[in-house]
Amino acid sequence: MVGAGGVGKTAIATRILTGKYLETKMTVGLNIQSWIMTDSETGQTYKTATFDLGGQTRFKFLHRSMVSGSHVMLLVFDVSRYESLIELEDWSDIIFNDDGPACLLVGNKLDLGLSFAEDEVKARAEELNIPYILLSAKTGENFDQFQSILIERIRNGMSRKK
Ligand SMILES: Nc1nc2c(ncn2[C@@H]2O[C@H](COP(=O)(O)OP(=O)(O)OP(=O)(O)O)[C@@H](O)[C@H]2O)c(=O)[nH]1
Ligand SMILES: [Mg+2]
């Protein structure tokens, strides 16, 4: 998971792991958590590790090798902060690498409402040729759909990197 500081990466990881929204603190460096995920379509289980990367720019140099070696990259932004979408451009080279992770653009804090047109997100996702989803880690809106796409991305990322 990558994205600007404060967009809600840790809140999303927490909801994946616990099904709940809990208050978070700024992530210093990174936070790794493991869990087992079952693909309801294939019955396959995956032992998963989330690398929740602190969004402060001073940590960025540490992230590139971890991200390019992973199966899935979630590019998280805050729908109420347009700059957080723009900042994700830093990861374009990894997105466009055929051997890179399967990617998903995630717009969080949907409960606050979008401060710009959804078409902007759509256009960005089309440019990068990756799917996108808007959700709220706080209310859980669209989280079920997110988890289905996530498992599809894991399947996709695993088959790329066999
Ligand atoms: N309204 C709203 N607030 C949220 C949501 N998700 C997270 N937040 C809040 O946004 C702030 C930052 O959330 P974090 O999950 O810590 O953000 P982060 O991306 O992990 O931040 P860094 O670790 O600094 O990179 C916290 O105060 C959260 O409570 C959401 O879906 N809606
Ligand atoms: Mg965090």
Image (cartoon, rainbow, N blue to C red):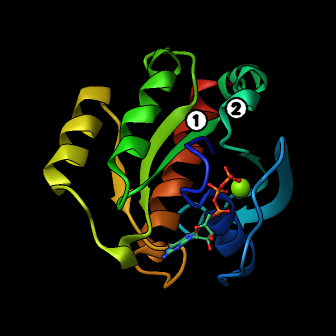
Q: Position of residue 53 (x, y in %)?
A: 73, 43
Circle 2 residue = 70
Three-letter amino acid code at the position of disc 2: Ser
* 108 shown above or below 124: below
Residue at 65% in and 74% down: 15
Which residue occupies the foreground of this view, 25 or 34?
25
Residue at 52% in and 66% down: 147
Three-letter amino acid code at the position of disc 1: Gly
Which residue occupies the foreground of this view, 101 or 23?
23
Q: Position of residue 119 (x, y in %)?
A: 14, 49
Q: Nearer the viewer, mark 2 or mark 1?
A: 2
In the figure, is residue 78 to the left or right of 52? left
Q: CA distance from mark 2 to mark 1?
A: 8 Å
Residue 38 seen in the figure:
no
Whether tag 2 and tag 1 are in contact, CB under 8 A, the answer is yes
Residue 54 figure quarter: top right
Whether the residue carrying mark 1 lies under 8 Å from ligand 1 is answered with: no
